[in-house]
Amino acid sequence: MKRILPALVVAGGLLLPAVGMAEDGGVTPGQFTANNVWMMLCAGLVFIMHLGFATLESGLTRAKNTTNILFKNTFIISIGILTYALVGFNLMYPGDFNGIFGFAGFGLAAGYDAAANTPAYADGGYTYWTDFLFQAMFAATAATIVSGAVAERIKLSSFMIFATIFVAVVYTIAGSWKWGGGWLDAAGFYDFAGSTLVHSVGGWGALAGVLLLGPRLGKYVNGKMNPIPGSSLPAATIGVFLLWLGWFGFNGGSVLSADPGATSFTLVTTCLAAAAGCVAAMATSWFRFSKPDLSMSLNGILAGLVGITAGADTVTITGAVIIGLAAGVLVVFSVMFFDRVKIDDPVGAISVHLVCGIWGTLAVGIFSTNPEHTLGAQALGIAAYGGFTFVSALAIFFVLKMTLGIRVSEEEELEGLDLGEHGQHAYDLATGPGWLEQQTGATARVARAPHTTLATSENA
Amino acid sequence: MKRILPALVVAGGLLLPAVGMAEDGGVTPGQFTANNVWMMLCAGLVFIMHLGFATLESGLTRAKNTTNILFKNTFIISIGILTYALVGFNLMYPGDFNGIFGFAGFGLAAGYDAAANTPAYADGGYTYWTDFLFQAMFAATAATIVSGAVAERIKLSSFMIFATIFVAVVYTIAGSWKWGGGWLDAAGFYDFAGSTLVHSVGGWGALAGVLLLGPRLGKYVNGKMNPIPGSSLPAATIGVFLLWLGWFGFNGGSVLSADPGATSFTLVTTCLAAAAGCVAAMATSWFRFSKPDLSMSLNGILAGLVGITAGADTVTITGAVIIGLAAGVLVVFSVMFFDRVKIDDPVGAISVHLVCGIWGTLAVGIFSTNPEHTLGAQALGIAAYGGFTFVSALAIFFVLKMTLGIRVSEEEELEGLDLGEHGQHAYDLATGPGWLEQQTGATARVARAPHTTLATSENA
Amino acid sequence: MKRILPALVVAGGLLLPAVGMAEDGGVTPGQFTANNVWMMLCAGLVFIMHLGFATLESGLTRAKNTTNILFKNTFIISIGILTYALVGFNLMYPGDFNGIFGFAGFGLAAGYDAAANTPAYADGGYTYWTDFLFQAMFAATAATIVSGAVAERIKLSSFMIFATIFVAVVYTIAGSWKWGGGWLDAAGFYDFAGSTLVHSVGGWGALAGVLLLGPRLGKYVNGKMNPIPGSSLPAATIGVFLLWLGWFGFNGGSVLSADPGATSFTLVTTCLAAAAGCVAAMATSWFRFSKPDLSMSLNGILAGLVGITAGADTVTITGAVIIGLAAGVLVVFSVMFFDRVKIDDPVGAISVHLVCGIWGTLAVGIFSTNPEHTLGAQALGIAAYGGFTFVSALAIFFVLKMTLGIRVSEEEELEGLDLGEHGQHAYDLATGPGWLEQQTGATARVARAPHTTLATSENA
């Protein structure tokens, strides 16, 4: 997903008669327009992943913490876009730099002439603006992954500070190493759409947070693990289907053009891996727990999607199915493993994004049809990203723990963060008139005199 | 968003080598196809805004009125499309007319030869059918805005009559003044995608309805304002994210072509304003109420979106952020203001759509890079739309109040409109077998003879 | 929706100056790219219909069976994609065959050179991979339709076996008769996007299942029909809006190109029929039950959509509205009819998909502008599909009933399939701290010593 592409890659339909194609190997206006339409829609699809994360995470946690989770997800996408415009885009894609750190300056579009209002300023196969928007939607994803793992006990203000730094600085500097053309790109590391650069990065952040926070109250008591069921499996299901849909844009857009062959092949490997992950997790949970588990099956879909992301454009069809199947098995055992070592991750984010992100990145070294992709380079990239982002996240959380604190009080955790942090319950689904009676005594009044008109004072 | 565009505007990628472009300045088939794909997808995105409104409004109101709200939203999109085909499209885009009122006749496609089935009949940069569909999805939006503000006490049949007239006649005649090429277009008024033409128009309708309806029972008692919490913040969150996504099409499609520069620049300003509105509303509510409020934050997103809509293609990046920040602050104080003057708007629609719609329209006069956009022309447009639509809506609601009545009985309001108007509760989330036991005594029967087969009469 | 298209159909914008179009009647690279973008997005839209079905079905059934329904829908899309890759695609589009049965071999892309990794392998107007993906999303739809009708009492494992065979073999062989270029295609039968090939096929499967299963416990007792209200009308509404949106891809993609005229005309007839179906079902239910029914209105939308699907590209605008209106009336009376004859279909799937699918297929013979479409050929197709798929489904369900059994125990049905099949409730929306207190006694401990720090053992 490097920004500057050779013209040959973005010229779609190469096998067809190239009537109307520019002589100089660039793209025709029609192709430029089609590229841009595709990339804008992919940005929209990645955007909707944020709704997917919000509903998934709120569905897999308790109803007393739902407002808090929704608030965090709403905040992350907003602050993510703003900080990416201010610093992130120019940290991640600094242009010529030393391969480790570069910064192209504050704000958008140094090269954009605002006074003349020529927004068509182009950057390869589509516009600068489309490029920014697509990348901004990606950036916010990494912080959102953390949100689910630390849910139900993290202090809101500390999380907001962490997420802002993580999305604006940590993710973007790390991203520059590969997608910005830095040292890992030069070292032959390959990560098509972010099994490592997005998902593992988020997963390492999640692991750091969970280690410093500790488990939720009551999760592990007297050596026994108490399962804490989520509040709404329909919400979780909506979330996973939206994430799957969003992955059409996440992987399909990472082609960085509408090249017909590359985009459509990528969507096929993506969907096959998701489906295989689902079926594998269903079978594994059925075998292990004797009943098929819906939340595991949903995580199986995500596991397959995260797994295929590093090599969606370059593995074979059979490879894609194997990657998905393995991810679906892996995620079930990983969830069980983290529970055994008392690392409490309410939504399974570490298993889905970190463990399957690593698996998918290694899988490129196994199933890629490109002989330049090697297990060694993949392992180097995994180690480099793991080291940098885990240490960075740990450092940020540690400073916050020493200063503001990162965990809510025991009372607040029991009562729920919705009341403690926001003073708002997320649900009030009673269908009777109960609330109004208690507030105003109105029903009693109606019962006494059911046909009186409304008091004027209430109906001005 | 005028329908007939100069060819230069719709020709994408002007800065690139124009190989393959038609010599006469028109669009190539490839560009025509790309334009059409983009506009159809934008129509789909605006369509999904109606689901956004449905979930947002039902989430911010009580569970006893949810069926009623969903019914209204389902009705509006349906009647909106049908009436737009019958009269609306030809009222809003009458072609040559006196600038105030024109009508091109009943039904679709006077110029369409049904017998020959040549649906490719083109209208500028894409087909006639795409044009109709995109505009029809817009039209229904204005009436939907009213729905939220009058929720929880308006009589269903009266609302349905109001909404039908409002979407078919009021919105469309008003729309012709600018987008149909009427007198306000000639006067230099600018409204790119409808801060005024859609959102304020809906907001004025909402204000008229609320003034004639009065507040909900129990909202303002003895000089005290009782907050009435919504039933489902997850539903509200789903709604706002879907609306944000839909705005990709609402603003992006208002370019009326797939022009790469204009569409992508528009999406960036749109998303920056939404994000800024969110962060500003979060901060404002945190400061004012000492806790950050999720529903205010969600309304902050909508405030930013409504605010940027009038000038999304023409303001600077910095201007977009400022417009969003201001809208996010404004919406919080506006909600508080309307509560203080006892104008009861359950979902904050008047603050979001009317107040921020006015702000966004004025902001064009401040932040536009086009020197022809002036505060004076913008104020003229705001006043003209306000006068016409507020008076029209007031008149319709007044006639309905004098005839059918516009408010449900006090008993029905207390019991909930779901039972009163539809006889259907929206939720029954008890997971036990309770209902069936009470209905049939089946459990008792099972308890007596758990291994008997099912009665043949039940299992034919 | 035949795969191999004459070049003239896929060349968009025929009425415009054809500058840049290939001389040999093929498509230009720009058009190929645009076609491919459109078809990939249509595949995404059809994908999201599976979320629509999941939420619709879970909303219209009881909360104690919600996990089970979501699990089934998650399984179907996953196994559907996998089996379509393994055998389905090559059964449905076998190339040259005897018109009744053909098989092009196992797996994807016999013609695809994996070693050379040239994924641009093209098949008419877009790539082979796009073709597979779009068709795979369709295939899974037919099985999903069955899911709703047999909900709340079918044994999970048996349903999974049925669905796998139905989607992989029955649907695909039947599909080859028309869309694969088989005998019904030769006989002049027309079904643009699947009123019969998808919806009736699913509906026949549903009818077979319901007949062998019998009604839910307590539905028909002592000659009386007990309505069993759904758990969540918001979920049902989300489902129907997502299905409507998905139909943009279902019908719009069935053009099999981005041809501007054909795609946009199709979207307009589709949306008009949906809107007309909604309004007609609202009016009919209001008239029959004296209150307007939301779930009937939602089914009216689906009825209109299913009805228009067979002729969306070929009927007139007026015809589309009439088809939708009739479908909206029909679905209400059909639901009442099936209840009268004690065929218990919890979500109305048989009425929506089978009855309105037949209506829509016949309507092509009435409203098509193509004189080659005749009522006789349409009736032949309906009979052939009905005979084959009903008998096939009945046979599969019968074998399963004789072996594994197809119905859960009476106890499990009363308790709910969520506990019986999955051991997981779908909802736990209590916002208080109740659960944790019962599990761990933590609150009691807090009450005694509210300011003690967390036990180290819980917070490692």
Image (spheres, coloured by chain):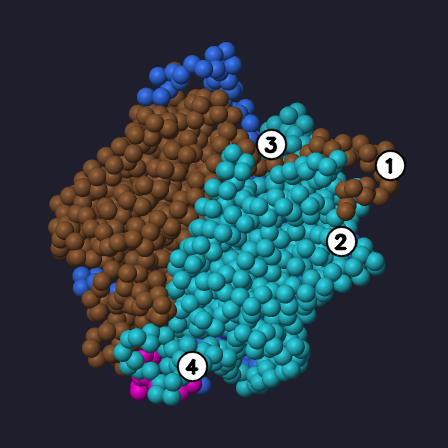
Chain colours: A cyan, B blue, C brown
Residue lying at 16% horizontally and 43% vertically, measured from the top left? C379
Q: Disc 2 marks which amino acid?
A: Leu
Tell me, yes or no, whether dots 3 and 1 are on the same chain. Answer: no
Q: Disc 4 marks which amino acid?
A: Ala
Name the one closer to the observer, C308 or B207.
C308
Tell me, yes or no, whether dots 3 and 4 are on the same chain. Answer: yes
Mark nearer the viewer, 4 or 2: 2
Segment colored magenta: B16-28
Tell me, yes or no, whether dots 4 and 2 are on the same chain. Answer: yes
As measured in the structure, the alpha-carbon distance from the residue carrying label 4 to the one carrying label 2 is 47 Å
- Mark sitting on residue A7: 4
Tell me, yes or no, whether dots 2 and 1 are on the same chain. Answer: no
- Mark sitting on residue A212: 2
Name the one closer to the observer, B257 or A270.
A270
Q: Chain of mark 1?
A: C
Mark nearer the viewer, 2 or 3: 2
